[in-house]
Image (cartoon, rainbow, N blue to C red):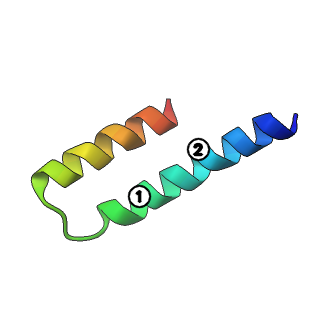
């Protein structure tokens, strides 16, 4: 159970980090990469 909670927490932290990064000034390539990673984490 602890591993599952740790995994879910890691996903949530990654999502939050990607959302914060997407609010900054990025190149189109960086934005595309983060949007892809965010989609994968949410899945």
Mark whose residue sits in front, 1 or 2: 2
Mark 2 burial class by Cα count in 10 Å: few <14, some 14-19, many 20+: some
User: At x 49% / y 38%, what residue is drawn?
Assistant: 41
- Determine whether 14 is above or below 26 in the image: above
Q: Position of residue 20 (x, y in %)?
A: 41, 65
Q: Position of residue 34 (x, y in %)?
A: 31, 48
Residue at x 18%, y 64% (from the top left corner): 26
Residue tagged 1 = 19
25 displayed left or right of 28: right
Q: Quadrant of residue 13?
A: bottom right
Q: Is residue 8 above or below residue 18?
A: above
Marks 1 and 2: CB-CB under 8 Å? Answer: no
Q: Quadrant of residue 6?
A: top right
Question: Along the horizontal axis of the image, is 39 left or right of 22?
Answer: right
Q: Which mark is residue 37?
A: none
Q: Earlier in the sequence, mark 1 or mark 2?
A: 2
The residue sitting at the right extreme is 1
Q: Residue furthest left?
A: 28
Q: CA distance from mark 1 to mark 2?
A: 12 Å
Q: Which mark is residue 11?
A: 2
Could you say whether the residue bearing mark 1 is in a helix, strand or loop?
Answer: helix
Q: Classify mark 1: residues with Cα within 10 Å, few (<14), some (14-19) or many (20+).
A: some
Q: Position of residue 14 (x, y in %)?
A: 51, 51
| Residue closest to the far top | 43
- Tell me the SS state at disc 2: helix
- Which quadrant does the N terminus fall into? top right
Say left or right for 5 vs 15.
right
Does 11 appear above or below 24?
above
Relative image position of residue 35 (x, y in whole percent): 30, 44
Single out the residue that lies furthest toward the bottom.
24
Q: In which quadrant of the rendered view does residue 2 lie? A: top right
């Amino acid at each position: 159970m602890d591993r599952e909670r740790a995994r879910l927490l890691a996903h949530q932290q990654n999502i939050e980090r990607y959302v914060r990064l997407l609010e900054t000034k990025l190149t189109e390539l960086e934005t595309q990469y983060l949007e892809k990673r965010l989609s994968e984490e949410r899945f």
